Structure formats: C-alpha cells, structure tokens
Amino acid sequence: MAVALKTVGVIRNPRSHGNRGAVAEEGPPGVRYAEPLTPAALSRDLRDFAADGVDLIVIDGGDGTVREVLSALPAAYGGAEPALAVLPSGKTNILALDLGARKSWTLETVLRRAREPEPIYKQRAPLEISWADGVRPPVRGFVFGMGAFVRATQMAQSVHRMGAYHSLAVGMTVAGAAVGALFGGSRDVWRQGVVANARLDEGSFRAGPRFVLMATTLKRLPFGLKPFGPPTDEMKVLDVDAPPRKLALAIPMVLGGRKAGWLERNGYRRRNAERLSVASEEPIIVDGEIFPGGEVIVRRGRPMRFLAP
C-alpha cells in the first residue's frame, strides 16, 4: 500500500517563462520554499531539504530547471532520493507533457494529490550523461542529442522570441528543421552532419558523419511524434547518417514511428540500449542546454518516482 507523503519542498525558478513577474503562491504551513538562482544555492537548498526529511520535491520550472534539480539530487540525498512532481512553468515542458501535467496541475493540486491515502506515481528513468575527462560533473536529463538536433534547439530560441512556447514551439522547430534539411542542398550545414564515433552497449564503434544522433527515455513527445518508434521504458536511440538519404520520404516515416526496411538500409537506425558512447568534438544538447562534446557516456539511469496528475 502506498504511503501519503507528508513533507513537501518546492524548488521554484522565478526566471522560468511561466513564473516571470509572478509571486510564489502561499502554501500551507510546513511546505518548504526555495528559489535558488545559482547551482551552489540549489545544492545548498537540496541539502537542507534532505536534512529536514522532505520526501516530495515539487519542481516549479521548465525542462532546464528539472535537469538542474535531478543532476544535483544525488549529492544531496544519496541513494534515498525523494519523489518528484513537475509543474509546467517553462517554455517547452517536455517532461511535464510526458507525465500528463497540464496547466491545471498547480501546486495546490499537487499538494492535494500527494496527501491522498494512496497517491499514484509514474516512473521515468532519466538519462545520465558523463564525460570521460571528469572535468564536468555528470548531468541528468531526458533528451540527449547532437547534429541537426543542436541546430534545431538553437532555432527554438528564435521561435521562443516569436512568442511560441510549449508544444507549438516544438512543432515549429521540427517543421523549420525539416525545411532546412530538405531544401538546403547536399552541402548545406543541416545535411552535412557532424563527425562522431558512437557505440551502443558493448558493440563496436560506428564511425562517420551523422545527420542526427538522439536518445531519450520519455514515452510521449509533442504532437504524437514518435521518432524513436513505439514508446517503451528503455533508452531509445535514433541514429541517422549524413547526408541523409531519401529525406523527403523518410521524414514522415521517422516522425510517425513507422517501420520500413528501406529506412535502415538508407541510414536511419532505431535501437534500444542501456549505454551510448559518443566521441566527438561537436557540442551536445541535454534538455535544451548546449554542452561541450568530447568522450561522452549516456546511460539509462535508475527510475525515479513522479507524482501523477
């Protein structure tokens, strides 16, 4: 039988799109609030939460805030990490969408649900991204990508400046990326790809230019897009050679999650894996943030509990 949570802490990002200019809503006594503005402050607040026995952390922010909180949790909580809830306060909120959190999923709703006799949780395993040189601390998130995905993310910044957010922003970015790749010509930067050596699990390295290399553990993406195929709990990888062949035919097939033998023969590969090893000097993306490349390991992490709407 599930046990209702009693100690709640809120990590609120006042800079998130949905929180700008708004004052944090007052919760009932006993709910801890923190608005850390630096990684050091976030680490300190999470350690305080752990010391006070906080067993549910509500993340009030976008995907970047989720990434920062998840990445800092192990140092604060060790192996006894708390349950989480995500308020869709950012620009894209891709994890919140996967969990089914809508605008009606407010702090008040979360608190009421958390204190039900048997609250319902969904499990999601984050990606754990680490660098072999050890210079940067590991990062936990839900979407990893490089190649065209980096350029599409950079394009998303322009889309946001146009006033498009959430699923609309994702849709406009995907459409813009598709147009750029289709009509840019074989020498266009979209189609040339990036040089990267990649290996799944203990297989051999596959070298060569890549149009896009992506991984996720999410089950649901905006607009019903299924570039990784059918939804599963595994780490799903999409690996596309550059320059992409038969792209006009492949785009609807790949985004629709459809299978066809000719896709793999033309360099469009979908796989499930526990570990993705990448060696490239090109930048990578983790949940909307650009990080430097290098020798990067992407693993499927341990499942975490998210309070379900």
Image: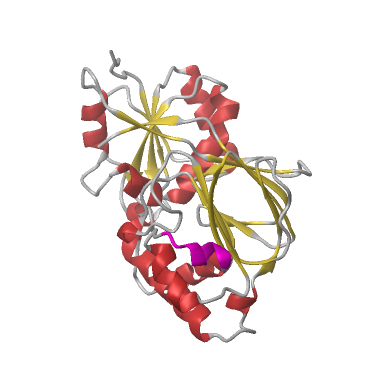
Residue at image position (62%, 78%) is 189
Magenta range: 259-265
Location of residue 38 with respect to 251 vertically, above or below: above
Residue at image position (56%, 70%) is 151
Query: In this image, 242 relative to 302: left or right?
Result: right
* Image coordinates for residue 57, horizontal then vertical, percent: 40, 30
Image quarter for residue 249? bottom left
Query: In this image, 134 relative to 52: left or right?
Result: right
Residue that lies at the very extreme toward the front in this rendered image: 261
Image quarter for residue 169? bottom left
Q: Nearer the viewer, residue 183 or 52?
A: 183
Location of residue 201 with respect to 161 vertically, above or below: above
Query: In this image, 304 relative to 166: left or right?
Result: right
Q: Quadrant of the N terminus?
A: top left
Query: Does 50 appear in magenta?
Result: no
Residue at image position (71%, 56%) is 206
